[in-house]
Image: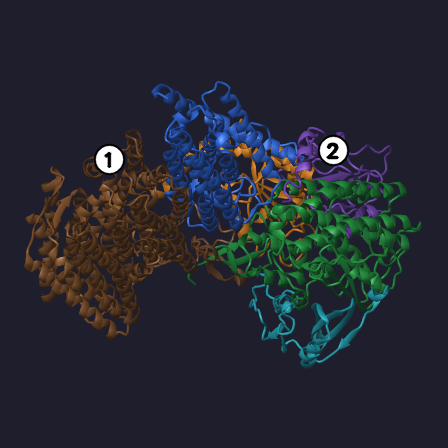
Chain colours: A blue, B cyan, C green, D orange, E brown, F purple
Amino acid sequence: MNLTTSIIGIAAYLILAPIAGGLLAGIDRKISARMQGRFGPPILQPFYDFFKLLEKEPITVNRVQDFYVMCFFIFIVITGCLFFAGGDLLLIIFSLTLASIFLVIAAFSSNSPYAQIGAERELLQMMAYEPMVLITAVGFYILNGSFNISDIVSSQVMGIQYLPGIFIGFVYILTIKLRKSPFDLSMSHHGHQELVKGLTTEFSGKTMAVIEIAHWYENIFLLGFVYLFFANSLAWSPVLAVVVCLATYFLEILIDNSYARMKWQFAINASWIVAITFGFVNLLVLYFIS
Amino acid sequence: MSEQWKIQNFISIEPTQLVDTLQDYKAEGYRLAQVHCTKVSEGFELTYSLDKDHVLTNFRIILPEEEEIMSITGIYWAAFIYENEMQDLFGVKFKHMALNYGGHFYKVSQPTPWNPKD
Amino acid sequence: MGKRTIIPFGPQHPVLPEPVHLDLVIEDEKVVEAIPSIGFIHRGLEKLVEKKEYTELVYVIERICGICSFGHGWGYCHTVEGLMGIEIPERAEYLRTIWHELSRVHSHLLWLGLLADGFGFESLFMHCWRLRERVLDLFEKTTGGRVIFSVCKVGGVRKDIDKETLDEMVSVLRGMEKELKELTETFINDYSVKNRLVGVGYLSKEDAIELCAVGPMARASGIRQDIRLTGNGVYDKLEFEPCVETAGDCYARTLVRMREVYQSIDMIAKAVELIPDGEISVPVKGNVPKGEFMARLEQPRGEAFYYSKGADSKFLERIRVRTPTNMNIPAMVKTLQGCDLADVPMLILTIDPCISCTER
Amino acid sequence: MSYVTKSPWIIHYDGSSCNGCDIEVLACLTPMYDVERFGIINTGNPKHADIFLVTGSVNEQNITVVKLIYEQMPEPKVVVAIGICATSGGIFKECYNIMGGIDTVIPVDVYVPGCAARPEAIIDGVVKGLGVLAEKRAAMDQKPAVAAEVKEKEEA
Amino acid sequence: MSTIIFLILFPFAVALALLVLKTDAARDMIVKVASIVIAAASVYLAVQYFGSGGEYFDFESETITYLMIGIETLLGVMIFYLGIKYKKYVASILAAIQTPVMLFFELGIGHSIHAANNLYVDRLSIVMVLIIGIIGTLICWYSIGYMKDFHHHHHEEPDRRPRFFFLLFLFLSAMFGIVVSNNLLWLYFFWEITTVCSFFLIGFTKTPEAIKNSFRALVFNMLGALGFTLAIVILGKYYGIMELNQLLAMGAMGVSVVLPVALLAFAGITKAAQMPFNSWLLGAMVAPTPTSALLHSSTMVKAGVFLIVKLSPVLGWNLAGVMVMLVGGITFLMASFAAISQSNAKRVLAYSTVANLGLIVACGGIGTYAAVWAAIMLIIFHAVTKSLLFLCVGTAEHNIGSRDIEDMDGLFGRMPKLATFMIVGIAGMFLAPFGMLISKWAAMKAFIDSGNVLLVMMIIFGSAATLFYWTKWLGKMVAIMAKQENIQQNVHKEEWLVLTSLTVLTVVICLVFPVMSSFLVVPYLETIYSSVATLALSSGNMYIMSAMLALVVLLPLLFYGKTSKRIVPIYLAGANLGDDLTFRGSMDKEVSVSLKNWYMDDYFAEKRMNLIGVIATVVVLVTVFSILLGGVL
Amino acid sequence: MAAFKLGKMILRSLFKKPATLMYPVVPRVWQERTRGHIENEINDCIFCGICQKKCPTNALVVDKAKRSWTIERMQCIQCSCCVEVCPKKCLTNENTYTTPSTEKVVDTYVGAAPEPKPVPKVEPKIEPKAEPEVVEEKAE
């Protein structure tokens, strides 16, 4: 991928991701509501929420948390930009980690009980999903000989053919990243949970709006990962990949609605077991055949 | 079986007998059903109800207002709720409570509203 | 203290529909110590005996709690009727029993929903409450209220239910059963639900006896204890066997309550078959004589306790209501120790706490 | 039109009520009434909430709690008192531990009558609250100037 | 060559002087001057040999040989005696075996082998000299103030500062010796001195625990030294060589040198505190903090990994290499897990050190171009960042009275400057634009390329654990607590100076690492690897990283702590009492909010992790050595 | 593994019409017995005051002299106690509830002077602001 396409990718991501992410969130809420036998909110509800949050009175619990949240947002966007510019997969993962850590730190900085426990749980979740994300990158690298996304999407092979285990593993941990039940431990989009709002307990107004929009950016970028599994040099593969992304998202909604929230022990056990059984075994097989 | 609910038996005992009696009954398999207090002219009228096989046995104690009574939390720990409640609302004094909220069980606008002191 | 985190849990907390407070001392997420504090709802309504006549008092007693409202009204009327020596008509007894069992269905469905919400299973919560609305519609149709019925009065009931409505009631409940099966199937067999319930908050039979647990809490620990067995209302004609489980954990408590929903539906159907025609109330006049009377009732949450003391006047001298939650709080405190923070909502919920009952 | 009215997030606190109104508030969230249609989410966290639904009256112990929750909510905010207990103390008005309706502690914007208040009434009440919310939001735009003036005066 | 000799002898001379001097002023003066001189000399050495990339020197003298033999024998006797005195007979036995063997060999076969070049300098040596010369002296400088406080805190004990500084400088001297010795006997000699220095410094406080731990360190290091001895004997007897470069050359020519290499690597493993020997480093944390910083994180343990990195060309896919990479990998994984369950800051740092050394060892074991690049980078970044962290903890300990992370509540309010330094240090250990992560990234890529899936999994899972324990500490640092009193004015000037320079160094080194890479590390690698592989980080990525770092540094400067928002109390479930620190608890009591981190003892209990690691590594070591010895016998 | 136990119901619900009543758009149909608010056929009222005496919440004020019957809407618990005790049966419990309001609604019904017939129809006396609400409700 040359510079022009990179710049187009970045620009498209910067502009379209929040719109797509917000819409996705709206559709998510609508579908969830329907699954629960309810009518549900308007599709544009997430945007209303976002603008509402911007209108609220600015309050904060200390002078620094906004800064950390801002950093979270900036690095999430940078991560997404690197991704859509066709950058290095490992760099992207590290950048994502950095961003997530800023969010955790923002919660820690408030020194408030529920935010703190939320932060601990978020950390635990990061520990749970990080291996699988890295394994995904390794899988692509072994397959394509490059960490560069531009090389991966233009390669001859379709990732899913050789990485089915890794794909399953990734979708599994995607549940954590998208904050869906059974793994919505650290913060939930629903009100009723033992941690009040977990991580985001102390954020409100504009700060919360920044977090929301960062999540939209993040979600789109995460679906980009799913896209990678199906994209190759064939012309029709992007279409298939997008369809699969949407199907995956639907699956996540379905999972969200048909599971109880699990405890952290389960989260870490399950994620690591999946990482080892699906991820590791897939990697072994890859080494074996390549 | 059917008419058990109509049985109303109240047995009067002395405050000093309470702990021994309850201990004996507990050994026989009675559970504590409830404790309550009524303010009467002689002081407090305490009722301890025990249940076994769906039959209630009520022990009635008349406690002069200034006297202390032995807590039964040593026998039935669950009684701490009743005793703290009576302590807060009536001003009944208990000795050796296993879990004493020290008057902060219910925060009420006036002390011992059931037995106003003025 | 080292690695201990101390956090306030409540009074305002999203998993607590009603305010209680716990000082939770946790290590990682393990609860080491939990000291409860209540009193956020204490109103002191028993003291209203001095201000309300015994016939009006029933409206106060009904509002001790909005979920077990009917039972409270019944229990209170029971004691006054006992004091005054009133025999109420049989049809009234039947109607009371039917409403009471219907309350149980509504209360248990409500609880199942809240439990599902407690472990973050939103859709299950929604579907439980969706079904519950049908029961509420029945209440609205028969009593005119959704949660507070105001149908019980000293001497009988205030409203009759005609034959068609009774039949409709049974058919609605039977219709519900099918969808209910799917929900209970989820509670019983779903992996994630079981993961959150099985083995959590274990209360042994010995502990349950020691801590004087009542109602579903006791029955889930293997104690055959159900005040309906004493034959109040028309329960002796309905032939039932209390639902008893032996596991003593949250899962068992869920099972007990779920089975009771079906059982209550059966009991209502049977009562509808047996209900005789006749008056629904007897006139009550005059003062309440001197004396005292104790009555008990199996509320959805367990054994509730009513006591009235008459003083030969329109005003009673003392009433006393001891609600099931009161007796289950010690068990809750006990089970809280050593559980996970994520289990705390579960444990608070499995005693099906009704704080406004407890504190009156 | 302000977005506040399109996404009112609520927080519910149970004063010393009988549970009747509480479960009706909860029922509003469930399929039959589904207030999420109006963008309402039950947040459970005062810092995220726009509308404060209080059921039950104020007693000695929860008076500070109600005050705190109200104070922790960012502007613009609206208080809806649900049920007659929250409005005036209701049937418990004469109890020794009841201080009265919510308006004895914090300003109430909308009263929802009923014992227990029906879900429909609660929805009506919240919708009415939205109007107040919009007004308050509009007032906020003028406020900073006022606030600055006050500050100057204080300093002077 | 004279610079080298100077670097070895000058610290030694200073050490002797410090042993004699008893006054504070004189000591301070000498330490400061000596530090500057040593740092300057090491920089001079770097400049001197930078262009040529190093050379070998045949500095030879019978006297020195005999002197060394004499000192070694003395040390052996002393250890034997101390072992008897403190009833640690294992140490005595080891000394009793090792010293005679060495003596016999050196006077016998060893004497007949002529070592052409006893000393050398190459770019790896330069890197190490710079680390020792700069980080080492900074730590010595820091010790001035620290030891005053330490003495103040432990005033019931006699003032042993002369001895402390003596050991510190003696150690520096020995360390320089290690990195420039080509003659294995010389290397062995300096190796032994570091062991003994470490032994005395761990037992510095002379508490029963300190003595126990010092002997543990001694025994484990002597086990390694025994391996070293055997390697020397085997090399001398069967290969007839005594020089490191010859050993490597033989390996490159295809001569099987697996057994001696494995033995040398074993020595390196013990010194680098790899499992199963990691417990000595944990025990060493009883020593005063500068000791921990200097010996047990940035330099002495680096001698172990230095040896392994040095040997890496002959490691790789042979038994010795597999042993090294597995031991390193397992150690990395298990030590990272174990760190999660620790709340004592020094122990967390210790486990992190063990883990990072494990990573370096694993890289060395793989022995490919990219892996060694990562290993060297790790050594550099780790030395700087870890010493910063250790010193920060030391300062915190003296000012808040605890080294427990949980007691660092609100440190940001109490000691903002120190907390900031610590945040930089912690971030430097695992976050994206900082050096450690860059090296880890490279290491990971090297692992993948080498085709060792197991090792890849270890680094992946280990990194996840690393993330957890660092971030929770970081969280403690950034937490803003209400009403904290600033107490940082009590800190010594020297400490601030050192901490500031280390912090700056941490950041600067990350900014200039591409330069370091291309001018120092890559040329070194080109001398040992004929083929030049592509590096993990393309230049584009390096630029992105640098840009990210700039962003991370600039953003706080621009926006940190600036807000016009109304500041409100935190959420305490409606039970606030108004000061953010207490809430109305049960029974109407005032309860303080206490927020502690997670330790997950059920999962990552230190004991269990150690046990698993020790068993796994022992199995690896025993298997490899039985195969090797079986092949020989 | 027993997973997706609720899956069937969820998927079915997804494609079925939601259970939501769409309340403000679709008006609620009340049951006959629904207890909404108390209405007084003021012309039949004899202002005996029994309802006031029996009302558990003291929401009623009857003034015989002014021939007014006042109800504090936000104090009434719809228990129908007054309806039951009313000797003239002029009180009824209508099935629509009092609409929420920004103020506490008090409705006063004033009976016409006793003698001259025919008596005018319901004439809710104006309590500022609250009045239109009452009228609106009746219109429904």
Give x and y (percent) for residue E568: 43, 46
- Residue type at the position of mark 2: Arg
Left or right, residue D141 beside residue C297: left
Please report, as a chain letter, where disc 2 is located.
F
Please report, as a chain letter, where disc 1 is located.
E
| Camera-nearest residue between A117 and E589 | A117
Pair 2/1: label in front: 1
| Camera-nearest residue between F14 and C297 | F14
Q: Quadrant of residue E527?
A: top left
Q: Quadrant of residue A189?
A: top right
| Camera-nearest residue between E165 and B33 | E165
Please tell me the numbered disc located at residue E257.
none
Give x and y (percent) for residue E293: 25, 55
State which quarter of the image contains the C terminus of chain E: bottom left
Residue extending furthest toward the front: E633
Q: CA distance from mark 2 to mark 1?
A: 73 Å
Can residue E174 be seen here? The reply is yes
Question: On the image, numbered disc 1 is attached to which residue?
Answer: E514
- Residue type at the position of mark 1: Pro
Identify which residue is drawn at 70% across, 40% down. Answer: C130
Q: Is residue F105 above or below residue E319?
A: above
* Circles 2 and 1 on the same subunit: no
Q: Is residue E61 above or below residue A49?
A: below
Left or right, residue C225 beside residue E347: right
